[in-house]
Amino acid sequence: MGVTCIIDFDNNPHGTYFAGQAVTGKVTLKLDKLKLARAVTLNINGYAETHWTESNSNNNDKHHNSTSDTYSAREDYIASQTYLVGSHMSTEVSLEPGVHVYNFACHIPATCPSSIEGHYGRVRYMIKVSLVRPWKFDQSYTRCFTVLKLMDLNYDSPLLRVPAHCETQKTYCCWPCKSDPLQLQMTLPQTGFVPGQVIPVDILVNNDSHIRVELLQISLVMMVTYYGTHMSTTHSQNERFIVTKLMGDPVPNHCNKQFKYFLRLPATPPTCFNACRIIQIAYTVELKAKVKGFHMDEVVKVPLTIGSVPLSENIQMQPRDMPGYPPQTLDVTGLAYPAEIATAPPGANWDSNIQPPNYEEALHMKSHGAKNTDELDGSAVPNTVNLDGSNFSPRYPIFNIPSPSAPMDSALNNNENVNSETNVNKGTWI
């Protein structure tokens, strides 16, 4: 068996915390025989990093040789090291057979951005226990945890409460065979939501063209922008996630139809523009009309803001996280929910009418296991896996609250067509 290391969080089995809280837990080392090491260290690290490669072709080179440039960037938020056994002065310490338990605690700065895992970068928080051995590679054990930046929609722009409307139109062929237009209109009752809510999407399709709309596709799209530097040159790279989608109805040619669909928001990180300088997150609700034949599909988009505290009935006018105003704070007096429902971090100051959320994995976003090297020190450590060996995926709050102009959640829970690949006909002829 050798050495077994288990990293547990206090009253928080999945390791989900808000920025500004303290992460506490214990490390359990089980040894079947005497072990010699220089020290046993515990490192708690939080950082954002980006990394990608771009190819450059030299048009002046007759052999058409190409080169590649690597862009990268990094921000550090937490860098804590504790010696569980020994010290930086130690030469050799003995670890007796048996079970050794060590407690740990670390404050998470309130300015830390939310965890995210992407192809070109990540915001990651992790604990690493290492047996430091001078005569061979360190023996290390790691566990990731989730940090959530509190984003209260009530202290963002008042425009989040205002309905949003967007429309576009397209004609097919050219004069003198130019068709009448296909017009798409999409309206949302507001643009600020939290995961767990249902977005009511009102759609009007005026298809005066001779081209049939085969189906409508309504999607929540998450756009992540990564920034990196190569030799003082800064570039950006985009990654597009389809968070959730549903397939709507067709619209025949020379017909007009209106629809109302309900798009449920799954677990996903909040919108982020200023918490992290090298990774930004934005969302849009996207309506795509897939048309018959080889014609280009028509698309209309409405920007969306996703937060971690939902809009309340009372309008809050005090802005936060802006120069001249205090940062958002979190009540951390209660350290956890009761053990039987401990899927969440210590409770925030939710509105008295809002039930505290559950926390679920973002299924559209998994850590990439291709990099088996720990970025912190280059040692070969699988640092992105859960205790069961699966790839680590951050957890985000899921609320069970009503949505504007949407049916009750209990009814939606029994509707197998919500956010499925096909949806019942919700259209009305006009």
Image (spheres, grey):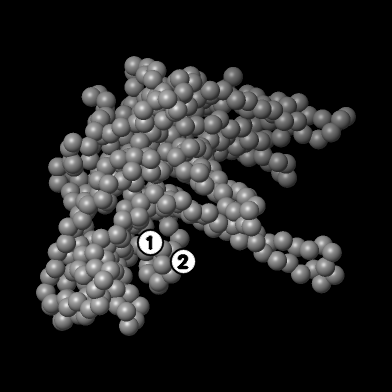
Image quadrant where residue 329 sits? top left
From the viewer's perspective, tell me whether residue 11 is left or right of residue 56: left
Q: Vertical placement of 145 versus 161: above or below?
A: below
From the viewer's perspective, tell me whether residue 349 is left or right of residue 175: left
Image quadrant where residue 290 sits? top right
Between 334 and 339, the residue placed more toward the observer is 334
Between 369 and 2, the residue placed more toward the observer is 2
User: x, y (%) of residue 107?
Assistant: 27, 47
Q: CA distance from mark 1 to mark 2?
A: 9 Å
Q: Which residue extends farthest front? A: 89
Tell me if residue 245 can be seen.
no
Tell me if residue 386 can be seen.
yes
Earlier sequence position, callout 1 versus callout 2: 2
Image quadrant where residue 206 sits? top right
Residue drawn at (18%, 36%), measured in percent from left and top? Answer: 333
Question: At numbered mark 1, what does the secondary structure look like: helix, strand or loop?
Answer: loop
Contact between labelled residues 2 and 1, with CB atoms less than 8 Å apart:
yes
Circle 1 Cα neighbour tier, 10 Å, few/some/many (<14 / 14–19 / ≥20): many
Question: At numbered mark 2, what does the secondary structure look like: helix, strand or loop?
Answer: loop
* Amino acid type, label 1: Thr
Which corner quadrant holds the N terminus?
bottom left
Q: Which residue is identified by label 1?
A: 384
Residue drawn at (46%, 66%), measured in percent from left and top? Answer: 371
Q: Vertical placement of 350 versus 91: above or below?
A: above
Q: Which residue is identified by label 2?
A: 371
Q: Vertical placement of 35 versus 299: above or below?
A: below
User: x, y (%) of residue 108?
Assistant: 31, 46
Between 54 and 133, the residue placed more toward the observer is 133
Residue drawn at (34%, 22%), measured in percent from left and top? Answer: 312
* Amino acid type, label 2: Lys
